[in-house]
Image (cartoon, grey):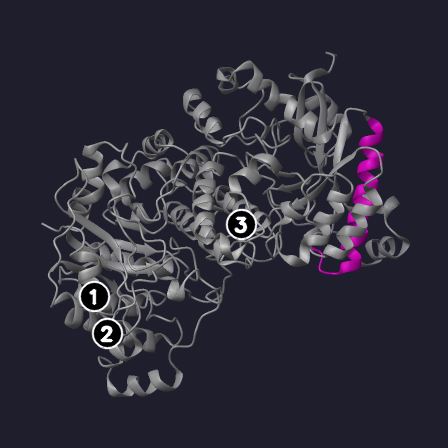
Amino acid sequence: MDAPNPTVIDCDVHAVLPSIGALLPFLPAYWREQVEQTGFKGPVDTWYPPGLPTSARPGSAPAGGGPAASTVELIQRDVLGEAPHPAFAILNCDCAVETLHNPDAASAVAGALNEWISAAWLSRDKRLRASIVVPSQFPELAVREIERRAREPGFVQVLLPVRSEAPYGSLNFRPVFAAAARHGLPVALHFGGVPGNPPTPVGWPSFYLEEYAGMTGVFQTHLISIIAGGVFDEHPQLRLVLAEGGFAWLPAMLWRFDKNWKGLRREIPWVRRPPSEYVWEHVRLTTAPLDAPEDPAQLRSAIAQLGSEDMLLYASDYPHAHGDSASDPVWEGLSGALKAKIMSGNARALYRL
Amino acid sequence: MKTPKKPPAGDPATLVDCDIHNHLTQEAVARYLPKKWQDYDRQFGRRSSPGDFYPKATPMASRTDAWPPGGGPPGSDLAFLRTQLLDAWPIEIGVLNTLITIKNQYRDYDAALATAANACQIAEWLAPEPRLRASLLVPFEDAALAVDEIRRHGGDRRFVQVLIPSRTSEPLGQRKYWPLYAAASEHGLPIGIHFGGWSGGHPISGAGWPAYYLEYHTGMIQTFQAHLISLVCEGVFEEFPDLKVVFIEGGLAWIAPLLWRLDRSWRQLKAENPRLRKAPSEYVRSHFWLTTQPVEEPPGPGQFLEMLSQLGMDDRLLFSTDYPHWDFDNPDSALPSAVPAALRQKMRRDNARALYRLN
């Protein structure tokens, strides 16, 4: 086995729950009984249609059956054990806890997921780190879960599904950011989520392609909301990670946002700098799937338009298959210093690894 | 009449303004309603719509100097619109986009309002002012009724497109809207999709209601993103190969990045939608036009030109002011001077002449 490469950190690897059965040892007695006696399966909705070519790269499912990326051995073999041999990988378990409308169920399942992540993944490999799963639809319960996990080894950020019923900058959600900030944890908004409301401002699309490509709009809503709401003014140390949402859309949005801020800032007087300055300081974005132009020269200009070299975090997005990797020739055109920041420097600073 | 300002050096002598808001007051429209609908209008009509309850920078989101001296709201007085806009710059043609009127309540009432508003536009705006053209108002959430209205005026060249506000009840590629596209195609009319509106049902983002007008205004782009994706993915341009779509007040800069993402995803997910025969970007670059205001402002003119080159739609950019709204783009200064003269001429005049058949 090749030694871990200290110059690579993979900031988005999926740890997939094989079934509610894996959580039984970690659920409270009441919920164990509900699972055993009522057939309750927990959050079964999955954002990725499992049969799609992009959902799982070939060979990423366990030989003995079960979903892709559902055992630590697969991650060890396919992510840590393969070029570029990342020194660390950040696990995101996006398990649709937001579909559970019963607050006790949501809280119990989120808690059990974190126990499972700790026992079945973090304790099995020192190179793994993980995001804290929270019942994001119940901010008060989410705060409790953050308080419970923040000091446990291996948990390095708070995970929120990007799709939600309300923009995360709304007043009701502030305690979650406060809890993350209190513990020095970044908050990651990750592609997907199943909150029940449509993913566009004009209703439901027909095709997965539409939802997939259009998801950048939902990222935009939250970013605008969090900045306009003054979340970064309240928590100057807070960092926000936009995971699996692309990055090429960001400059155009900031040009519009900055222009509107100039015209309308009287409405949000606590926001005293142009939004782009908040973004450079507080926001980080993972690279996979790469939705930038395929021409390396155009990719370089798309990255330059971001306006800061501190923002991109390399990610494989394992087991999803979007056709990009750290060995992609598009990265070769970047300067050595920028490439080093994207591959590990920015993540090292963010997660203090 | 004031002497028009001279266009900046290198610009064409005249320009076409592709987004002007004339305000048809309730009283003005009511004059053209049949009696039974006048009664209905008084008793039940004109409920306000959610999503408008933000303080919007200025009264009626308008320039504070745009209130006509003779009374009435901004954009309601043709004489003052001439003074403040048409005569102040060398505007050869201005396209009117009336934003109110269709409320998406009782569909027959919507249809009556659209018919009355179009009659009002002809009598009070288009007939007295030859420099003006208008977008046709239609009850767009009911395609059959909308088709009736398109048939009524489709031969009148003063109506240059069919107007749909961007906050619809479904993504615009959905088949319930297709009869409207068929009728528009038949009459050679583009579909103009304009920032805003309300059709009921959905908050103004894919993740609920934002707190501030600044968010509403910045995030409105997402309605255009959803429509672009939907119109392409549903195969609308395979079904209606002559259909033209104009995004009005929807910005420019977000389109190239979205197309990179859409093209890449389509290549992997082609099997989901066999109707599409080309990359999504090819449909967009051959069926869409874009008005400029409020034009995005990258940090420098170099990045503005880079954005235009990534967009690759030089023949499809249409200058607009958005008069009388607060975020009015001034024809003298809105486009960075680094934009080459040949492209300015296309944006300020020639593209609009070709699209709207103004010659």
- CA gap between label 2 and label 3 equals 41 Å
> Marks 1 and 2: in contact by CB < 8 Å?
yes
Please state which of residues A138 and B265 is positioned toward the viewer in this rendering.
Answer: A138
Which residue position is annotated with label 3?
A221
Splitting the image into 4 quarters, where does residue A79 fall?
top right
Q: Residue at x 22, y 79 (%)?
A: B32
Q: Is residue A111 left or right of residue B14?
A: right
* Membership of A107 in magenta stretch: yes
Q: Position of residue B42 (x, y in %)?
A: 35, 85
Residue B211 belongs to magenta span:
no
Which SS type dominates the magenta stretch? helix
Query: Disc 2 residue type?
Result: Gly
Chain letter of mark 3 equals: A
Considering only vertical position in the picture, is A336 above or below A65? above
Give how far across and how far down residue A108 sits, in percent: 81, 52
Say if residue A204 shows up in the picture.
Answer: no
Mark 1, Cα crowd under 10 Å, few <14 / some 14-19 / many 20+, is some
Same chain assignment for discs 3 and 1:
no
Give the residues in magenta.
A99-124
The residue where tag 1 is placed is B80
Q: Are marks 2 and 1 on the same chain?
A: yes
Give the spatial CA distance, label 3 vs label 1: 38 Å
